[in-house]
Image (spheres, helix red, strand yellow):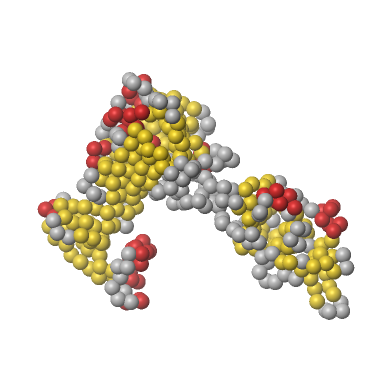
């Protein structure tokens, strides 16, 4: 059962990482010291798996290398990935546009790799590459699987829940696994839980955002091919393990929301496909008196009262938006303060004596014409988002009567 769980737990790693870059997130460390960054794209239970890498650090015995040719590549001829890597690792020679990066071509006994960065030479060759590639690997070549925790700005994602034979349950982000030995989860309290894979009875996927479906929070779909023919496509959200591996089964939610139970012994292959329904929610960090309208920076103006009109003089920085759903984001001392924020149509007034104009609204407008938010939610980071449905074009403000601040915006068709 230990070998079976090793394979199945790694199968679970296929789609549990929902980073800002949807298909990346895993670091596969091999027993020879090589490190692959990317994701598992295909598995054949009991045989091997395919890892799709977006970058990698590869270690080769010197005996496998026939020759190495170094080349100086000008900064202007580098790909964006190599330019970024060279900047971060202080690897450039020279200055400004004349900078060069030394990249190498390696001729091996069984092929050639081009445009790689040599990190170590001697008894072994260690090189780094930013080229995408696929690697067919056996399970016993893996030392450890690692993953970074989600960014705090990401409000969507999938957590893993494990129930052990002892009755203990763990929930958190998958951060590390030693195949066939231990799994590590980063929990909500900020530390890592480590437990033995042999103790697991059930492994479940849970969306971290209760306002989104699992499909909206998972970047990749599971494709399960059966030995007797037939394919299921959806999200594997539960695996159950028993003393007899032949009894182990999984539950997969299909795209039409049906749930299918599949015995693990009946599965010929797992694959991954991009999930078109993936809709991650990205948070924004704001301080008090900082505002964003539909993710555009907005300026709040302090108002004054002139002859019963609450007025302000906006400048050219007023946000221009399309009519429809308007989302205001800010940080409030108390989320209940959102009830005070009202959207009002602002009108242009002219001061004939001073020959100036300004925008404003009246107390009667506040009482009779204020548009209330249709939805208010505060993220775990303390950012409050208020949605307003405004169908008609015009010049509007979000007004806070407590601070007497107006945040203007103009709506177009």
Image height of 115 relative to 264, above or below: below
Image quadrant where one finds the N terminus: top left
Name which residue lies at 30% across and 49% down: 36
Left or right? Give the position of 168 relative to 106.
right
Image height of 116 relative to 30, above or below: below
Image height of 99 relative to 234, above or below: below
Q: Position of residue 342 (x, y in %)?
A: 75, 54
Nearest to the observer: residue 386 or residue 131: 386
Q: Position of residue 311 (x, y in %)?
A: 79, 67
Is residue 366 visible to the viewer in this orientation of the structure? yes
Numbered disc total:
0
Q: Position of residue 298 (x, y in %)?
A: 65, 63
Name which residue lies at 56% across and 51% down: 381
Name which residue lies at 35% across and 71% down: 76
Left or right? Give the position of 130 relative to 112.
right
For residue 316, what is the image quadrant?
Answer: bottom right
């Amino acid at each position: 059962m230990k070998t079976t769980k090793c394979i199945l737990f790694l199968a679970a790693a296929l789609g549990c990482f929902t980073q800002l870059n949807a298909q990346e997130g895993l670091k596969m460390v091999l027993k020879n010291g090589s490190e692959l960054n990317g994701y598992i794209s295909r598995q054949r239970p009991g045989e091997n798996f395919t890892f799709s890498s977006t970058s990698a650090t590869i270690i080769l015995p010197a005996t496998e290398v026939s020759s190495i040719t170094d080349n100086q590549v000008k900064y202007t001829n580098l790909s964006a990935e190599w330019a970024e890597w060279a900047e971060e690792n202080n690897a450039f020679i020279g200055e400004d546009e004349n900078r060069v990066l030394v990249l190498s071509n390696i001729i091996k006994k069984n092929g050639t790799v081009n445009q790689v960065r040599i990190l170590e030479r001697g008894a072994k060759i260690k090189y780094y590459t930013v080229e995408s590639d696929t690697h067919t690997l056996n399970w016993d070549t893996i030392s450890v699987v690692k993953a970074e925790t989600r960014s705090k700005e990401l409000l969507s994602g999938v957590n893993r829940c494990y129930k052990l034979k002892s009755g203990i349950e763990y929930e958190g982000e998958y951060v590390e696994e030693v195949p066939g030995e231990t799994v590590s989860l980063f929990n909500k309290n900020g530390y890592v839980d480590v437990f033995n894979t042999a103790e697991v009875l059930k492994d479940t996927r849970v969306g971290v955002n209760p306002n989104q479906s699992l499909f909206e929070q998972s970047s990749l779909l599971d494709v399960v091919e059966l030995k007797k023919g037939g394919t299921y496509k959806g999200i594997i959200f539960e695996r159950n393990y028993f003393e007899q591996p032949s009894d182990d089964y999984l539950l997969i939610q299909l795209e039409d929301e049906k749930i299918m139970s599949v015995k693990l012994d009946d599965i010929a292959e797992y694959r991954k496909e991009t999930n078109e329904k993936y809709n991650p929610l990205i948070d924004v960090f704001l301080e008090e008196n900082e505002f964003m309208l539909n993710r555009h920076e907005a300026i709040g103006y302090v108002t004054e009262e002139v002859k019963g009109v609450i007025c302000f003089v906006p400048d050219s920085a007023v946000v221009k938006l399309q009519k429809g759903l308007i989302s205001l984001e800010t940080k409030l001392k108390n989320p209940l303060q959102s009830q005070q924020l009202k959207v009002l149509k602002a009108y242009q007034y002219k001061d004939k004596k001073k020959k100036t104009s300004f925008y404003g609204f009246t107390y009667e407008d506040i009482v009779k014409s204020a548009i209330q938010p249709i939805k208010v939610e505060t993220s775990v980071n303390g950012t409050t988002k208020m949605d307003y449905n405004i169908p008609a074009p015009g010049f509007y403000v979000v007004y806070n009567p407590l601070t007497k601040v107006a945040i203007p915006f103009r709506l177009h068709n």
